[in-house]
Amino acid sequence: MKTHASILRNAPGSFEPVDLDLEGPRTGELTVKLVASGLCHSDDHMATGDIPYGIYPLCGGHEGAGVVTEVGSHTPGWEVGDHVVFTFVPACGRCRWCAEGKQNICDLGATMLNGARFDDPTSFRMSLDGAPVGQMSGISTFSEFTTVSVNSAVKVPKDVPLKPLCLLGCGVGTGWGSAVNAADVRPGQTVIVMGVGGIGTSAVQGAAHAGATTVIAVDPVPFKRESAMEFGATHAAANMAEALDMTRHVTNGQGPDAVIVTVGVTTAEHVGQALAAVRKSGVVVATGAGPAGVSDVPINLLELTMSQKRLVGALFGQTSPFTSIPWLTQMYAAGRLKLNEMITKTYTLDQVAQGYRDMHAGTIIRGIVDFEA
């Protein structure tokens, strides 16, 4: 079938609309009509080349939700009309990591930047003029229709609005989990969130949900600092120096219990600043992505050891998507998780490139492609 989509022809590059050929579902696969897709910064990392992809052209998008239109043969448990949220990290449910409750680092994730089917690196579901087109994370949500593995689709209730749930496929789960899981925020703690775009705003919500009494949002953009206050931040600062001044009054000079780094383009300096700021036995969570070659993080090894500080990475907020997405859906349905408020602006599929220009300009928290607009 034909599907309208937004692709990158190369990197560096810009998203452009095209019509692609899309294969129907095989066993263990679904074809889904998209309802909405978030404009996550990770796709922009593909456009800039900060994160190299296995094949171009590449159909972007990895944060989406939709309705199943076709089910592959011998694929039990699914039917046409099911509502799904995609998980950008697939989970097989059988490997060592899935068995340990760490679906976010499932072995299938090793192939998610190849653009092909997870089990066959030569098999592609999308094509353009007969040439293969890679699927971002195996799902490509910048497309009216997409065909995916059931390992990438989480069924959600039909009575919950589907458009805002698209954010659960990456940004919200990543940020919220970075606070609740990776930082293990506890009641009464002080938390700094560096960078409050879509993921950082979700980290603010997670820290507040976990009981932190002081949550400081750090961002140079005034609009983002103001917005963070609506999602649970108690203070906002333009830089880390301001944020640390604020923590001294509530931590007896000790510093924050946790610093969560969710800067859109994370640098070694950001991580170094966070590690220098956190109190003894505190934790720094590195969630934001940066250029693949960055490895010169300035760490004082004596301080790291003697102050027993911790630096941890967080992929998808250390969440297991097949449990966290249903949980977060329930929280949203109960009015405990703000999703609608995160969506600053909606775009058409042909406006994806403009959406990322707005993101760079700092005028949105999260933009989404609304396929029903």
Image (cartoon, grey):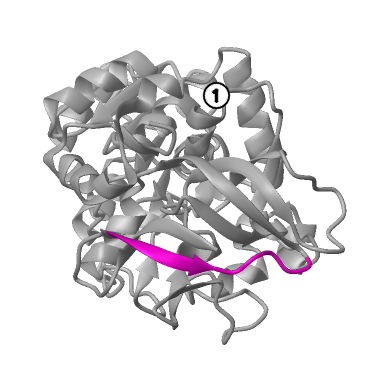
Residue 363, percent from left and from top: 16, 32
The residue to which callout 1 is attached is: 210
Q: Is residue 282 visible?
A: no
User: x, y (%) of residue 61?
Assistant: 42, 54
Q: Residue furthest front?
A: 1
34 left or right of 258 in image: right
Residue located 41% across and 53% down the image: 142
Q: How many marks?
A: 1
Q: State whether residue 46 is above or below residue 284.
A: below
The reply to whether residue 351 is visible in this rendering is: yes
Residue 22 within the segment the image draws in magenta: yes
In-image side of 100 versus 114 (left or right): right
In front: 25, or 102?
25
Residue shown at 27% from the left, 41% from the top: 277
**249 versus 65 height, above or below:** above
Looking at the picture, does residue 20 appear above or below residue 212? below
Quadrant for the N terminus in the image: bottom right
Amino acid type at image mark 1: Ala
Q: Position of residue 256 (x, y in %)?
A: 35, 32
Left or right: 20 in relation to 292:
right
Return the residue nearer the eye: 127 or 49: 127
Range of the magenta residues? 17-27
